[in-house]
Image (tube, rainbow, N blue to C red):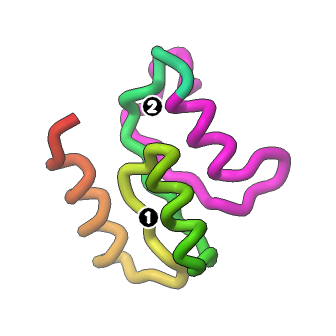
Amino acid sequence: MLIAGEADFLITDWNMPGISGLELLLEVRANPATQKLPVLMVSAETKHERIVEATRAGVDGYVIKPFTAQTLKHKIDEILMSPR
């Protein structure tokens, strides 16, 4: 679905079965068809090193669980308003 261009925004968790959110992010950024897709990562991973790793990999935003609907909306709005 991502490669076919059927997504305008990707929200992923760091910890998922089969592929980590970081691995997915790296694949998204490596593919010319998806490299500019906005990506928000949500995670219980609070270690600074993990957040830095996701930022270096090209994540557009990072929200630590648990979070409120207001926090999620704010972060999505922030990402969508930033120039790409």
| Image quarter in which the N terminus is found | top right
Q: Secondary structure at mark 1?
A: strand
Q: Which residue is at the front of the view, 32 or 66?
A: 32
Residue 29 horizontal/vertical position (percent): 50, 31
* Amino acid type for the residue under numbered disc 1: Tyr
- Within 10 Å of disc 1 (Cα), the crowding (few <14, some 14-19, many 20+) is many
Disc number at residue 62? 1
Q: Which residue is mark 2?
A: 7
The answer to whether residue 9 is magenta is: yes
Question: Which residues lie in the magenta part?
Answer: 1-29
Q: Which residue is at the front of the view, 20 or 77?
A: 20
- For the point 53% across and 76% down, the residue is 48
- For the point 44% across and 64% down, the residue is 62
Quadrant for residue 74, please give it: bottom left
Considering only order in the chain, which callout, 1 or 2, is on the residue closer to the N terminus? Answer: 2
In this picture, residue 72 sits left or right of residue 46: left
The answer to whether residue 7 is magenta is: yes
Q: Disc 2 vs disc 1: which is toward the camera?
A: 1
* Amino acid type for the residue under numbered disc 2: Ala
Residue 57 horizontal/vertical position (percent): 51, 45
Residue 82 horizontal/vertical position (percent): 17, 47
In the figure, 66 relative to 55: above or below? below
Q: Which residue is at the front of the view, 49 or 32?
A: 49
